[in-house]
Image (cartoon, coloured by chain):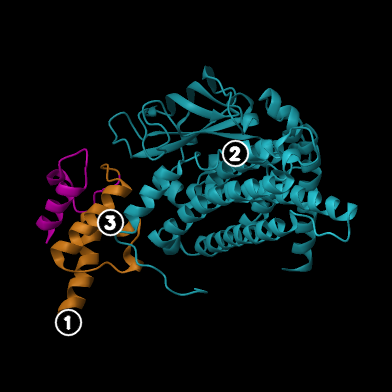
């Protein structure tokens, strides 16, 4: 990395840490009230983090996957819901940066995203389809230069707070359910009617309510590339990587709390090794394994981005699926381990060692794109995919 | 070969349209070929032509149309006959 590149990366980390400090201060209140983490998102906008992925020539910072993942992890150490909102925004942004550059409207919109720090939401799930984002019931209706869209979206995370929403639908009213496109609809071009509430075990601040979305937009706001390509080339990989990064952040904070607990005990009785010390060593190994998985996933994606054949290969899809399944399980095991170390002070709310919120938030990991769905997809791919037997690749 | 490919697409592809109406270059994904069905199709092709698709061919593009499947098969069948 060049000296300039490094300086920018450091400043990005510093900006993310300032956001994390704000997010941490409000995390418990956000969780308790299941409210939008307005302070943290405002801090992200103030630090101009929402536009970092936009190419430099369009007013952004051309942030790499690794840099975005680092921000997800840093904010994840403070407030899972804020980090998840940031991650979901960046997943949508990756659709624009990977597939929108050839379209004048989408290029101009990226410039606007960077300048105005727009928060992007996502409407990919639908009543009657569930979490299968590669099928749609609703269709976009194009008449001349106008496109109309109505979607019964079972989930639009922070939909009411988003500045624009990327919506999947069938390409036209006669298209097959898997023949999909994605359309950008900007605030003012759509209406949302709330259909379901978000009162959940964890990740309470993402406000992932259901909405009926009705939009009418210029047809040029439809991505020119099929959604199948967007899903395969950017969305699935960035989802699994950014989510894994923020789950890693949750795990890091849990281990930090466990370590603080053991250290406090060691200070009280320096001659006695605290009972949790051995378990701390164990959980440190688990955390390192999780970190390695996320870093390897980031590197694999950066490498595949430069090579369309690799990006579209089954081996890559299997690797990204495996990353998601593995890290979503690791985060729970690590927090559970940390709770064994912290004991009742980890179980209780309102102590410096509380882990209840971490544990509740992390339970969403196995469910958001259900691991069962991902494993069934992987098992199908493995019927034909050839295993890479090399260690380093 | 085209007829055999069409027959296997009919059997495994789960398309929403009649395979006979599709041109050689018609996009099978647009016609409703899911990623799940594409794997069933690959398995069917491997069995019928007694070949194995190498990792480099296991991508979306290879199975995007009857013509692209035919081109991939032609390479593999030639190679297995030459061996």
Distance of label 3 from label 2 (alpha carbons): 33 Å
Image x and y of residue B18, in percent: 15, 41
Using the rendered image of the protein, determine whether residue B70 is visible from the camera's viewpoint: yes
Using the rendered image of the protein, determine whether residue A59 is visible from the camera's viewpoint: no
For residue A9, above or below residue A341: below
Residue occupying image coordinates x 60% and y 61%: A289
Q: What element carries label 1?
A: helix
Q: Residue at the far left: name it.
A: B3
Q: In the figure, the cyan chain has which letter? A: A
| A70 sits to left or right of A139 | right
Q: Name the residue under label 2.
A: A109
Image x and y of residue A276, in percent: 74, 53
Q: In the figure, the orange chain has which letter? A: B
- Give the chain of mark 1: B
Looking at marks 1 and 3 on the same chain, the residue that comes earlier in the sequence is marked by: 3
Q: Give the range drawn in magenta.
A: B1-29
Q: Mark 1 points at which residue?
A: B82
Quadrant in which the N terminus of chain A is drawn: bottom right
* In magenta stretch: residue B14: yes
């Amino acid at each position: 990395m060049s000296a300039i590149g490094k300086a920018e990366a450091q400043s990005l980390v510093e900006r993310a840490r300032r956001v994390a400090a704000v997010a941490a201060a409000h995390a418990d209140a956000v969780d308790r009230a299941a409210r939008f983490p307005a302070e943290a998102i405002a801090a992200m906008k103030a630090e101009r983090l929402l536009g970092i992925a936009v190419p430099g020539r369009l007013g952004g910072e051309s942030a790499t996957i690794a840099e975005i993942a680092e921000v997800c992890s840093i904010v994840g150490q403070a407030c899972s819901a804020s980090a998840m909102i940031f991650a979901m925004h960046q997943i949508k942004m990756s659709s624009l940066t990977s597939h929108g550059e050839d379209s004048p409207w989408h290029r101009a919109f990226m410039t606007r995203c960077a300048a105005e720090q727009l928060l992007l939401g996502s409407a990919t799930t639908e009543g009657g389809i569930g979490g299968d984002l590669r099928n749609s019931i609703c269709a976009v209706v194009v008449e001349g230069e106008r496109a109309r869209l109505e979607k019964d979206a079972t989930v639009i995370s922070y939909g009411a707070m988003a500045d624009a929403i990327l919506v999947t639908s069938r390409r036209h009213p006669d298209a097959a359910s898997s023949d999909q496109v994605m359309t950008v609809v900007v605030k003012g071009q759509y209406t949302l009617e709330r259909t379901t509430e978000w009162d959940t075990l964890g990740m309470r601040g993402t406000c992932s309510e259901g909405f009926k979305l009705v939009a009418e937009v210029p047809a040029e706001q439809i991505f020119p590339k099929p959604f199948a390509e967007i899903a395969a080339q950017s969305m699935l990989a960035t989802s699994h990587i950014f989510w894994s990064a923020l789950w890693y952040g949750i795990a890091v904070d849990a281990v930090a709390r466990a370590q603080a607990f053991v250290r406090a005990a060691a200070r009280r009785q320096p001659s006695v090794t605290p009972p949790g010390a051995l378990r701390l060593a164990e959980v440190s190994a688990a955390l390192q394994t999780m970190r390695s998985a996320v870093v390897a996933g980031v590197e694999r994606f950066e490498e595949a981005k430069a090579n369309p054949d690799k990006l579209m290969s089954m081996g890559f899809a299997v690797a990204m699926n495996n990353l998601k399944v593995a890290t979503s399980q690791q985060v729970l095991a690590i927090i559970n381990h940390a709770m064994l170390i912290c004991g009742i002070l980890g179980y209780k709310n309102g102590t410096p060692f509380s882990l209840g919120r971490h544990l509740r938030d992390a339970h969403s990991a196995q469910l958001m794109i259900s691991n069962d769905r991902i494993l069934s997809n992987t098992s199908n791919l493995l019927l034909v995919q050839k295993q890479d037997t090399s260690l380093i690749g | 070969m085209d007829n055999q490919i069409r027959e296997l697409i009919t059997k495994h592809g789960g398309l929403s349209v009649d395979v006979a109406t599709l041109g050689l270059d018609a996009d099978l994904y647009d016609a409703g070929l899911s990623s799940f069905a594409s794997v069933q199709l690959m398995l069917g092709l491997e069995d019928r032509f007694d070949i194995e698709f190498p990792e480099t061919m296991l991508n979306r593009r290879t199975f995007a149309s009857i013509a692209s499947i035919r081109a991939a098969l032609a390479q593999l069948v030639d190679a297995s006959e030459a061996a």
